[in-house]
Amino acid sequence: MKKILISTFAISALLLNVSCDTDFDTDVKDVVVTSGEANFSKYVSLGNSLTSGYRDGALYLDGQNESYPSMIAMQMKLAGGGDFKQPLMPNNVGGFNNLPGFSGKLVLSVVNGSLTPVPSAPAAALDNISSGAPYQNLGIPGAKSFHLGIASYGSLNPFYARFSTGVSPVAAAVAQNPTFFSLWIGNNDILSYATSGGTNSTTTGGVTTYTPAVVQTGNINPATYGSNDISDPNVVASSINSYVTALTANGAKGVIANIPSVTAIPFFTTVPYNPLTPAALGANLNTLNTSLYGPLKQALTAFGAGDRINLLSSTSSNPVLIRDVSLTNLSAQLTAALTPSLGAATAAAFGQIYGQARQATAEDYILLTTRAVIGSTNPNAPASINVYGISYPLENQHVLSKTEAANVTTAMTAYNTSIKSIADAKGLAFVDANAKMVELNSQSGILYDGIRYTAKFVTGGAFSLDGVHLTGRGYAIIANEFIKAINAKYKSTLPQVNPNNYSGVKFP
């Protein structure tokens, strides 16, 4: 990953109290703790990585011990709650050294004088702790909405394989006869599409369609439902409704949360669309305008697409060059137009490379992982036009374009409409996680006992080093949203937790 510069001022801002204000609204810490109309004696939680305590790109012991369900369970114990057991990892690094793609947690290390998140080596092989079941935290990294209902999900996901007893996660929860449950699922139904830059296997506006009937029979085939596909909103709604129906069948009460906008998290907001400063481009700026941007703009203008490319500015920051697969491909037209001046072979290369190229706008999202790509070279491109983001377009997997971002927003809106309807129909407490994320992503952020939290990468305090998952402090903020919703719905008086008592980003 590209270096992350953390200033002394930014670090100080994390440590100093700047105000006596607090966002502990409607806190009940000075009130006698009661369960109200709820029964917390057997609490189970269902969800994905956010529920498990995943952070820094891995599932590891410290993160699990600061999962938001474990914080809620701790407060529930004050009102008659029972034990809350989690499928804890055997180490504090994470990863599986006998499986590809499961590295250990990210840590900040000094690389060439700058702080940089670096993945750790995986600490151990995949273990099996199913003999310790039942577990009350059924948060599974990577789980999509429909996955929680698949009996064979352990064969598809090693995180569930660790503690699966051969039944679906929902069946494992129902078998415990819970008196109270929390359910937060659906993030991954759009997240994998977004973090892959909108690349997926089968698309209809980004969405792969399955009928609710197929979902209810548990016959979704992961081989045909691509890992990066946006789930059909009907699938998400049907899945969540079926889970809630099963969980409430014996009178259990619960709380469910909606899906926050993934484009509000640091993975999408850290790298600006226009990071190319005149100073960084230096003498290349004029050369690029003369030999590349100028001729491209002239040729594209002839085809009514001159707005795709503008000359680089010598006074302000410039946008990166991207490939937008939603654009009409003008490769053939560009090849023909440039052949007289560049020759057939060079014109063909230009046409192929720039047929769907344009400069990014503020409506596009450059992925956090893309910062390591910008300015690197593509060995397969001609040497004169091989610099990613400058003379060679960033490919689809490096950018969530405005069209792809709209696909995400459309699906999220549909998911959230259904989740709120299900909560209302079943009489459940409801957490507007999306609204809390908007608040966290605002310039003012969220203030707790003088410490301000924002969605700013690393220095904001709420998000871990992967830019997607929260720190212990961030999970505490979420735990409080669940607690407030539970108290409001069931007249309980569970005290909130203090996010400042939990861990943030660890500096070397």
Image (cartoon, rainbow, N blue to C red):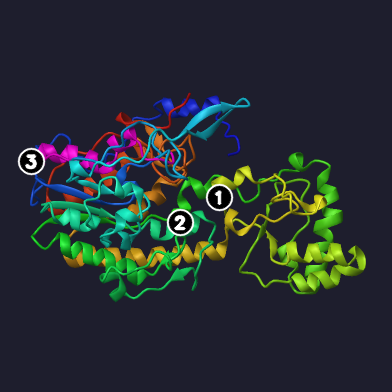
| Circle 2 or circle 1, nearest the eye | 2
Residue occupied by mark 3: 80
Relative to 205, residue 375 above or below: above
Q: Mark 3 to mark 1: distance in Å?
A: 45 Å
Q: Give the residue type at disc 1.
A: Leu
Q: Secondary structure at mark 3?
A: loop
Q: Position of residue 258 (x, y in %)?
A: 32, 58
* Rendered position, 183 above or below 297: above
Q: CA distance from mark 3 to mark 2?
A: 39 Å
Rendered location of residue 241, percent (x, y): 24, 66
Residue 412 appears in view: yes
For image coordinates 40% across by 44% down, the residue present is 469
Please tell me the numbered disc located at residue 367: 1
Q: Is residue 429 visible?
A: no
Q: Is residue 77 magenta?
A: yes
Horizontally, residue 301 falls left or right of residue 17, namely: right
- Label 3 amino acid? Gly
N-term-proximal mark, 2 vs 1: 2
Q: CA distance from mark 2 to mark 1?
A: 12 Å
Instruction: Name the residue nearer the viewer: 217 or 108.
Output: 217
Q: Say which amino acid is labelled 2.
A: Ser
**Magenta-drawn segment:** 56-84
**Residue 158 marker:** none
Answer above or below: position of 202 versus 115. below
Q: Which residue was labeled with disc 2?
A: 192
What's the residue at 55%, 32% (across, down)?
116
Give whichever of discs 3 and 1 has the lower sequence position.
Answer: 3
When asked about the image quadrant of residue 219, the answer is bottom left
Q: Closer to the N terminus: mark 3 or mark 2?
A: 3
